[in-house]
Image (cartoon, coloured by chain):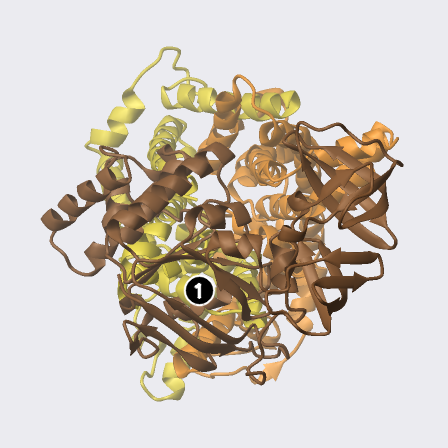
Amino acid sequence: MKTLPAYTMRFLLYGVLAAPLLLFGLYAFSEHWFFPAFLPKDWTTAPFIRIVADAQTGKSLATSLGVAFLSSLLSLLVAFPAARTLGLQKFRGRQLAWLIFFLPMVVPPLAVGMGLNILFMRLGLAGSLFGVVLSHLVPTIPYTIFTLAGVFAGYDKNFEHQARVLGATQLRVFFNITLRLILPGLVVAGLFAFLISWSQYLLTLLIGSGQVLTLPLLLFSAISGGNPTSIAALALLFVLPPVLVIAASARYLNQHGNTVREQY
Amino acid sequence: MAPAILLVGILFGVSLIYGLAQSLGLLTGTDQRALSLAAYQNVLYGSEGRGTEFWTSLGFSLWVAGVSTLLSAVGALPVAAWLNYQNGRGRQMDTLALNWNLAFPHLVWAIGLLLFFSQSGLLARLAALLGWIQNPADFPVLVRDRLGIGIIVDYVTKEIPFLALIVLAALRSQPEDYGVVAANLGATPWQRLRFVTLPQIFPSLISGSLLVFAFVFSAYEVPSVLGMPYPRMLPVLALDFFANPDLHHRAEGMAISLIIAAIVVIAAAISLHYEKHAGSSQ
Amino acid sequence: MAHIDLISLTKTYPGRIRPVLDGFSLNIASGELVALLGPSGSGKSTLLKLITGIERPDTGDIHFDGKSVLPVAPNKRGAVLMFQKAYLFPFLSVAENIGFGLKVQGESPKTIQKEVARLLDIIGLPGVEKRKPSQLSGGEQQRIALARALIVQPHLLLLDEPLNSLDPAVRMNLQETIRRIQRELKITTILVTHDLSEAMAMADRMALLINGQVAAVDQPMRLFQQPPNEAAARFVGITTFLKGSLAHGTLRTDYGNLMVNTNGHMANSALFAIRPEHIQVQQHPGQNAIPGKVVGCMYRGEHIEYQIAASGLAIRARVPMPAAMVPHGENVFVVFPQEYLFAINEQSVRHSSTT
């Protein structure tokens, strides 16, 4: 189908996908770009460096990375055995377990965050990094479980049996057989847990009580500030890690990306 | 299994219980000690501003979510069909391009649209360059507008790839041979599309569309960035009430948020029903 | 319900050197069931694609009732295929599946309903109209697929290993059903299979497809008992070939002299063959007997299968039960009864150059 509509379609697709980065670049690396100039006259990295080098930016970047990394790691650890059971075994109460994991995925973070807000305040978890991570687990664990359960549903346990009867220890079987077989699924699940946590605004806002400052929160305050340069600079900083992880795991995405049903 | 159930079950369950209690007037920091449906009454038929704004917001939310879902579904079909038609390297690249979309959280996407479509944004500057407008004010209001066009554009552009991937997965999971069987039984290409391909992807499309609806209906970030102070979508209204310094509004915010959750769960349940349908047909 | 002529069909896929089909010719009479047998890769599925019109032949022609169908689009040809998998549309009911072919032709719902009921009767599953395909067993699904194919009254029915995924008992039952319906409706049919016994049980004639050509075509019994050439013989389970020179009704071989019926066969060098069940094993010498040693012996219920080494010749013999087992390592005599030895061609396929 080497026809005009095909090229138009492809052009649109790639254009729409590349556009945000270009747009942020225009705003982040320019100064005194006043209407109606179509392109900036003064190109400069000064405002971008100023914003990125700002102590608050650095701190929230570190917080964001830490929260997202911890959330996805904990999710994988907790989800792995659950997904294995859910994907491989039939047991009583399976439907119920399934429901318990399904509901947090669809109930919006707004309701969850508002509900947890008071509880965490009473427990003294509000405003703490740990509290925020804990709240992020509500959407990330179920998501990780369902992704991994899908992987395990197509998993043949006989590979493990074969390794066992050939003399491998249980530990060895886990590291040499199980992990290697489901690695692509594990990467995708971890990746999306990271992304869900990374872009989480409401839960951080409602649990962090203004004391845990992540990039989305900083971005929101920049938006109310209204300065396009700082908005664009922060947006670039915010979108960079997701772009990098998606690019790095591209080959796994083609295998498992179709299972992505969660949004963030 | 147990740690996951406990962790998720307790966190989620307790958040619901606390949420429900708050919406009934408890634990909100006020001195109320008895259950009360006042918050729901105020929200649903209060005569003050709040009562009326709920219905406006509900209508606005349904409008934005409905139109976004419909346009996304209609847009996703040709994209998926076109991708399915491709083969080899081009097809892999395009699928990857759709996944690339995942790298942009909704918040970032909304900011991009804001910088592009606002009255002093890049599009307005282009219009000025071409001599169509003189001042930013001459440019039509495309984001932060009363009809929610900016919000809808954001969701449609993000959800078309989302739905296209779902439809594509449905198309690829079905053996190609059904089309061959149909042709062999005398079906024309158009009849194959009408009687074989569309029924194959229909359950997946409906299921995915309902997920989109649920998400758009309950998400906060995009309407917060691209929306107007009035009308507001329900999540924005809910958070505004909840964060109101007057603690009496907390219960109302919580009530709205639970109403949103209920609607979303219903949409998700129907979606699930269709997804099972899609699963059983494979 | 048409006679079919497949005329010198040739097909080479792009990038391949060897043709998949290499001058394939076969004529099928109206109402006849021809089984097409061949090892995998022999061009069976390509042939079906050419007949249904999914692919075009490089050269050659396909005639239905004497008229070329090459210009006819696949959906207008009336050559309906039934696959190994039933491929019932999962989102349609049984009745909607069967009626599909009539629906796309624009028939009225009433006609379709009547026809569906009639076909359900024929295939012996009345009353399942409203069920979904997933509620039926594998055998029932294949019956529905057959009904779906028959409802359009095709000129030619193509069965592409339709019973392969079924249990043996269901399979036998369906073989009978298909054959009965095919005879009743007098529908011209090509059955593609690699199961020899299925082909013999169902077909009026069998055609052996080897290397893209028809290696042999005949009635099942004749093809089984006296295949015309070595390739065909191997395909029907013959492994014992005796090569030698022929003089006065005697075949002189490296293993000894054998009395044979020449049937006018006068060539100096000749190849004879014998079916394994016609070979006898005994412990004393005799006419047409050569000495050998038992190197393999398997009890198979209805017969014993011996592997016997006789001066460099590996002989496989099937001795019907009841018989005494000759143990492994024993010296025996292998008898080739004169009436069962038959001459065959060494060359498998008649090339177009040899007239």
In the rendered picture of this protein, how many numbered marks are placed on residues? Answer: 1
Note whether A214 is above or below C62 in the view shown: above
Which residue is pictured at 81% across the width and 32% down the height?
A: C326
Inspect this view and state whether residue C139 appears.
Answer: yes
Q: Is residue C31 above or below residue A127?
A: below
Q: Nearer the viewer, residue C266 or B17?
A: C266
Residue drawn at (34%, 36%) of the image: B270
Q: Residue at x 30, y 58 (%)?
A: C31
Q: Is residue B184 left or right of residue C119?
A: right
Residue in the foreground of this view, choosing between B31 and C349: C349
Chain letter for the part of the structure drawn in yellow: B
- The chain in brown: C
Label 1 sits on residue: C48
Look at label 1 and name its amino acid: Leu
Quadrant of the image occupied by residue B47: top left
Please tell me which residue lies in front, A217 or C289: C289
**Which color was chain A given?**
orange
Position in image of residue C323 (x %, y %) = 71, 29
Image x and y of residue B6, in percent: 60, 20
Q: Chain of mark 1?
A: C
Q: Is residue C54 left or right of residue C100?
A: right
Dot 1: element = helix
In this picture, residue C221 sits left or right of residue B139: right
Residue at the spot x=53%, y=51% of the render?
A258
Residue A27 to residue C91: above or below: below
Label 1 packing within 10 angstroms: few (<14), some (14-19), many (20+): many
Mark yes or no: residue A227 visible.
no
Quadrant placement of the C terminus of chain C: bottom right
- In the displayed orientation, state which residue is furthest to the top: B34
Quarter in which the N terminus of chain C is drawn: bottom left
Closer to the camera, C51 or C327? Answer: C327
- The single residue placed furthest to the front in the displayed view is C248
